Image: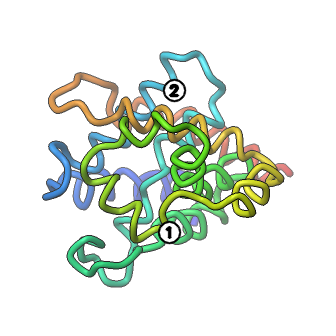
Amino acid sequence: MNSDDFLNQLSDLFTTHGAKGDSNQRLSNAEHMLQTAAAARAANTDDVLIAACLLHDIGHWLHPEPVDALKRSKDDCHEDIGAQYLAPHFADPVIRPVALHVAAKRYLCATEPDYFQKLSPASVRTLEHQGGPMDAAEVADFQAITDHQNAIAIRRWDEYGKVPGLDVPSFDAYRPMLRELMTTKREN
């Protein structure tokens, strides 16, 4: 699949699956992802992290059983599904933070006592199914992973991406940046 076809597929996901409301949040998943990317862009971070923020929850829409994880009382592993989906098109610096953003939530809950208070009610409920706060060994393992700091950054911007009605750029505003990152992947 060429870059434009893949970008069209992503755009379709944002407008179809992503536009559906989530019973556990006050906004759609697409709105959440766009707001997370906008928070990263406002922080003047690099395009790699902005792309990872934009795409971090894409796995929710790709799950073979697209049923709310809370209703099934188990982890949907959306971070792994999303990273696998993106891997043919983006380099590791985009993919790794997507794959690690749930672990980053668990890490922050274990290492920063006030972080848990910043989670939305839905994030609190899913934390239990995702393994809860990390133990000391998991914290050490997480800190040894390349790009773990980028996953932590995504988690921090994720908490800003939960404001109903916030006006942020659409998916199409990110197309040129995503196309450039995809071209960079092909060249390496």
Q: Nearer the viewer, residue 29 or 73?
A: 73
Q: Nearer the viewer, residue 57 or 132?
A: 132
In 3D space, how far apart are the residues under numbered discs 1 and 2 (Cα atoms)?
27 Å
Residue 81's place in the image compared with 149, above or below, is below
Name the kind of residue labelled 2 in the image: Ala
For the point 44% across and 25% down, which residue is it? Answer: 39
Tell me the element at label 2.
helix
Quarter assignment of residue 85: bottom right
Q: Which mark, by number, is residue 40? A: 2
Q: Which mark, by number, is residue 114? A: none
User: Which of label 1 and label 2 is nearer to you?
Assistant: 1
For the point 56% across and 37% down, which residue is it? Answer: 112
Quarter assignment of residue 17: bottom left
Say which label, 1 or 2, has the lower sequence index: 2
For the point 39% across and 66% down, which residue is it? Answer: 128
Q: Is residue 43 left or right of residue 22?
A: right
Instruction: Please name the residue that numbered disc 1 is placed on.
Output: 131
Residue 76, given in percent of the width and then of the height, sits at 40, 74
Residue 31's place in the image compared with 59, above or below, is above
Which quadrant of the figure contains the N terminus? bottom right
Residue 184's place in the image compared with 2, above or below, is above
For the point 46% across and 68% down, which residue is it? Answer: 130
Residue 38, given in percent of the width and then of the height, sits at 42, 26
Q: How many marks?
A: 2
Few, some or many C-alpha atoms within 10 Å of disc 1 (few <14, some 14-19, many ≥20)?
A: some
